[in-house]
Amino acid sequence: MKPQVLEEYAARQAALCIQNDTIPDALFREYGVNRGLRDENGVGVLTGLTKISNIVSFRHDQGQRIPCEGELWYRSCNVKDLVGSLGPQEFGFEKAAYLLLFGQLPSAEALEEFAALLGSCRTLPTNFTRDVIMKAPSHDIMNSMTRSVLTLANYDDQAAPGSLDNSLRQCIRLIAEFPMLAVYGYHAYNHYENDQSMYIHRPDPSLSTAEVFLQLLRPDKAYTPLEAKALDTALILHMEHGGGNNSTFTTRVVTSSGADTYATTAAALSSLKGPRHGGANLKVMEMMRDLKTQVPDWSSRSAVEGYLRKLLNKEAFDRSGLIYGMGHAVYSISDPREQVLKAFVRDLALDKGREKDLALYETIEELAPRLIAESRPIYKGVSPNVDFYSGFLYEMLDIPLELYTPLFAVARIVGWSAHRLEELVGAGKIIRPAYMSILR
């Protein structure tokens, strides 16, 4: 069959899918079904219990839910305090990973052992890079990573689901290998599709995860302490975010079916790939580039406000009516991750002479909540989320756009692993939600 025949058929028959699969909003209200497992106020339907992390965005007072400053807890540690406890030259990714996986902060000796173990695991099977990553390069690095993860199962003699310690072994290897899968996938694409030089550096096992990522990415393997520290902080903040986010819930669902670690991780990657989940900072960057094109003097506060009003009125950019990077499904008054990351963004902007860009972001951060509140009903506060600044941070680190979501995965694999282990320890029932049929 010619491809064109199939394409024409699909285009024609898609109308039947729309006709027969559309369910009116009124029926969701009639049967009390929450779209996306969230009610009109954005509160999620409880689907499980976890001891791994906690998000605080409201306080309860005499039966009332009162919006409050956001908090993110990894086990028993407030993330703000965790990042703040690190020394100026200290990297925290490995410490936070240990905390999430094992439920407690490591001693100095335990941290040294764990970091060394990750470093020793930063290897891929013989010829894997050549035979798997380089032979089928893709502009979509998330697809490349997913394929690599599934293929790694073929190199594991104990790939099948087994004991808890076997799953832990696999999780630790994947945490160590993810920076390589992401960066090597990008270099293969950049070489074969963009005709650029390809660099396949071997990671230094003595380096932190953030340092390894920059070392693998850059032709000269060079980076500054500030660059590595800023990236390390971003990785910590993206590592985990409660059990209710899409990719983590996917991890729990697939794990509950009895699937192996590789299949579970591939499913989580596929979930994160969706632009509604892992691509938020890309939309922020695209929006900012459009703003600079449409507003000649983007140092003018009134001109920026005019552009933001056009966004909300669906007259600019993608006409979605959204100011990307503003608001969050859970947080109300503030996103604690944004508050932590912004300090490093500011330091990096000053170091790289990007003060004008920083001022633009800060202007939008100040104007957007008021303009959004004026244009539509707000059930909870509106504040910038972590994705508002993370794309700017990655841009200043010269990280290509194709690696923004894969970099998210490099961090979030830790959270996925922790939730997989918790699901295995609980050994509960398969997660099998109910759907109500409305066939007549």
Image (cartoon, rainbow, N blue to C red):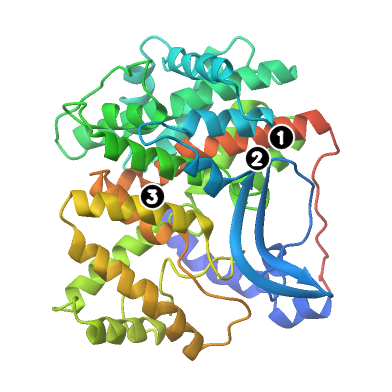
From the image, which quarter does the C terminus lie in? bottom right
Type of amino acid at the residue the image marks with label 3? Pro
Q: Position of residue 376 (x, y in %)?
A: 53, 87
Q: Please say if 157 is above or below 45.
A: above
Disc 1 packing (10 Å; few <14; some 14–19; many ≥20) = many
Q: Position of residue 217 (x, y in %)?
A: 26, 32
Residue 332, numbered circle: none
Tag 1–tag 2 contact (CB < 8 Å): yes
| 33 sits to left or right of 123 | right
| 21 sits to left or right of 143 | right
Which residue corresponds to the image point at 40% horizontal and 31% vertical from the top-left? 90
Observer-side mark, 3 or 2, equals 2
Type of amino acid at the residue the image marks with label 2? Thr
Q: Secondary structure at mark 1?
A: helix
How many numbered circles does the render carry? 3
Residue bearing the label numbered 1: 255
Residue 3, numbered circle: 3
Residue bearing the label numbered 2: 251
Q: Secondary structure at mark 3?
A: helix
Q: Position of residue 371 (x, y in %)?
A: 42, 85
Which residue corresponds to the image point at 80% horizontal and 53% vertical from the top-left? 433
**Distance between mark 1 and mark 3 Cα atoms:** 37 Å
Which residue corresponds to the image point at 75% horizontal and 17% vertical from the top-left? 163
**Distance between mark 1 and mark 2 Cα atoms:** 6 Å
Disc 3 packing (10 Å; few <14; some 14–19; many ≥20) = few
Residue 280 visible in the current orientation = no
Q: Please say if 225 is above or below 300.
A: above
